[in-house]
Image: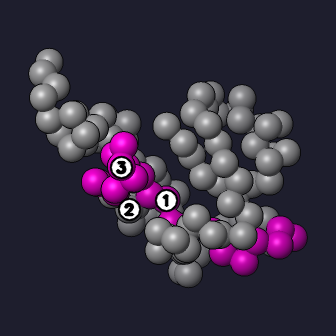
Amino acid sequence: MVTVSTDTPEEIRDERHLHGIQADMLSDRTLAVTDAFGLRNTAFHTGNPQDEIEALPVPATLLVDAEGIVRWVDISQNYQQRTDPEVVLAAIRTVLDPTWRE
């Protein structure tokens, strides 16, 4: 699991414990990854006004297979909400491991 954020590497290092995140976190200050997936949020910018970031990503969850092919995407309609972990787990089971059985 990898997360992508517009936070600086230092902010990620210093604040990741606040959210209990255990995934690898990557900094996307230039929005290169955000733009590569077409996830630039042009409607809202809720970041710090003194921050040099010109936009923020749309909250999205992508499942990418071992070959790098995007197999599932959930894009939030509300910029303050993220995909429920149970929804992601169900998608993993269905899309990435269709042989999985409870």
Q: Is residue 74 visible?
A: no
The residue located at (72%, 78%) in the rendering is 54
In the image, taking residue 90 as reference, residue 84 lies left or right, namely right
Front position in the image: 20 or 32: 32
Q: Please name the residue that numbered disc 2 is placed on.
A: 75
Residue 101, placed above or below residue 57: above
Horizontal side of 17 relative to 83 (left or right) equals: right
Identify the residue at image location x=63%, y=69%: 32
Where is mark 3, residue-wise?
67
First reached walking from the N terminus: tag 3 or tag 1: 1
Q: Which residue is mark 1?
A: 59
At label 1, the amino acid type is Pro
At which x and y percent is residue 50?
87, 70
How many residues crowd around disc 2 within 10 Å: few (fewer than 14), some, or many (20 or more)?
Answer: some
Q: In the image, which residues are magenta?
A: 50-72
Question: What's the residue type where badge 2 is placed?
Answer: Ile
Q: Secondary structure at mark 3?
A: loop
